[in-house]
Amino acid sequence: KATLNDNNPTNEDPSAADWENCLNELKKVLEEDPSNDIVAFLKESSASSYEGDKKFHMLAAIPDKQKRRSVHQLMKSTIFSSVALADTREGRIRVWHKKFEGDMPPDTFTGARGGGDKSGSSSKNGVDRGGKGRNNKNNKGGSWPADRPDFLRFVLYKENIDTSTAAKDVVRMARLNPKRGISFAGMKDKRGVTSQFCSTYRIEKEQLLAVNKTHEMPGFSGGGNTSSKGAGVLRVGNLSYSSDEVRLGSLGGNRFDIVLRNVDFGYKGTLTKEIVREKLGTAAKALQDVGFINYFGMQRFGKSNDTHEVGIAILKGDFKSAVEIIMREKNDENSQRVAEARKTWANRFVGIDVKNNENAAKDAEMKCAKSIQTDMGRFMVCEKSIVSTLARKPRDYKRAFSSIAKNMRSMFLHAYQSYLWNKVASHRIKTGGSSDVQVGDLVLIEDKSLKEGGGGTSGLKGKAVKVLDAEDVKGGKYSISDVVLPLVGSKIIYPKGSSGEHYDELLKKDDISKADFSKIGNIDKEISLSGDYRKLMCKPSDVTFEIKAYQ
């Protein structure tokens, strides 16, 4: 049989005959639709111009064990091995393009020895998280010393790079195992001068320090975003071996140095230095003594402030509206090219009777999607996934939305949870103040992640709450710093009284029920919304401040 390797030793732009051969072999194992979808994904990903976010295609659950085994064996055959890999996650097969092999998780199951569905850990690189003395290909000296801890802990310093991008750069520059990468406790923004603890598994210090040599820039002397003229700066240091891995969520908090310049606090009288110091000092003292309302920041809702609207549509199972919200024209669009593409999309059905001529509607949408594919910006991963899918499957909005990466699909739903939380937080402060607890408040009585050194941000696990009654309030055991509000989900408890009623009012306004959060698995099998609890007030520790006048 002809194979991609036979016809195309360089693996660039396989011919139509190559793809046809792949499709024919797939149809011997799978139905026509999933076979077409796999080949379309691999073909699209093979293009040198491909910038999409989708790295694998996930098949629907296959009950037949022999059928699953056959898919894995086919992906390992010479027909597919040059362009594809397959693994199993949560009982479903994922087909990856070969170029994304480095992004496959380290605990993935690749269907070895017949492609079963066990959920154990395997890796072609022979790296295992547990066990002393195992070989590690990153350790050029051979086996890892038995008396040395497994993890190399270090500080990652960066400017003008977000944590995710910085982590990928470290892996590339230090030539680490891309499947294992580096681990960190939380994300830090691109726009900041930040340092954070990270760790990597069984690596010599000298190998990691190569990052500092690789990332040197002529004339760099540090000192913030402008010092590097907008370029990214990356350094590693403070290296030491540890038995503990730095894990996501095990974050005690963040320490900030913040400067506010040209402060305008709305004073209408004649300003004097004394008044300025008094007003600013009062505000800073309030931050010390009371803290601030623990709102979710505006970035949670997207630059157009509509991310949560997509979440509402998904909870209703309205994929068409979800796609339209993502793709519609935006008032704050910076790129003229993108703005024109959105306008073209909005007008794709002009002159077509969509209700009575579905074929014409499909044809118009397919042509439009193909025409604007290259106009979407580099970081518009959701839009690009949608357009790419609709260029092949017009008017299939569920498929289009599902082509977006899982973490991004979850983001829309989390945005709606955050939107509700912010609204109820404002209501609670307005009706009950920011100083005292009241009957009906929810308080956190246990959070095991805090005991383990974390910041209490790791979901519902280990958390327990109670609803305060009159006796609790009178007893004075709890303070406003103990009060939490739930992120709406299937497994949370709601506060009583006005705050609890406000959740119901907000959900009713959006035509959403609490039960919809339990049913999300029927809409998107990869996502669950169990909920969480978040502190109403945040009181930072070790707050100091000074007021300086400058010219």
Image: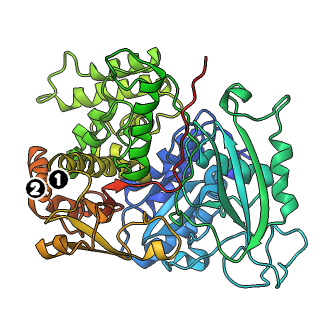
| Residue 1 in sight from this viewpoint | no
- Is residue 67 shown left or right of residue 353? right
Left or right side of 199 for 510: left
Q: Please indicate, yes or no, whether residue 125 appears anywhere in the rendered image.
A: yes
At horizontal 85% and vertical 51% (from top left) the residue drawn is 210
Q: Amino acid at mark 1?
A: Gly
Q: What percent of the width, then of the height, locates residue 182?
A: 67, 60
Which residue is pictured at 43% across the width and 21% down the height?
A: 338
Is residue 375 rendered to the left or right of residue 184? left
Residue under pointer 1: 432
Residue 113: x, y in percent?
A: 61, 79
Residue located beneath label 2 in the image: 498
The x, y position of residue 533, in whole percent, is 31, 63
Label 2 neighbourhood size at 10 Å, few (<14), some (14-19), many (20+)? Answer: some
Query: As shown in the figure, which amino acid type bears the numbered disc 2?
Result: Ser
Q: Secondary structure at mark 2?
A: helix
Q: Earlier in the sequence, mark 2 or mark 1?
A: 1
Q: Residues within 10 Å of mark 1 (few under 14, many from 20)?
A: some
Q: Residue at x 12, y 30 (%)?
A: 355
Picture quadrant where residue 386 is located: top left
- In this rendered view, identify the residue nearer to me: 376 or 440: 440
Query: Camera-side residue: 308 or 339?
Result: 308
Taking the spot 22% from the left edge, 44% from the top edge, the residue there is 313
Considering every residue shown, the one lying at the far front of the view is 274
> Callout 1: helix, strand or loop?
helix
* Eye-nearest disc, 2 or 1: 1
Q: Residues at badges 2 and 1 in contact (C-beta under 8 Å)?
A: yes
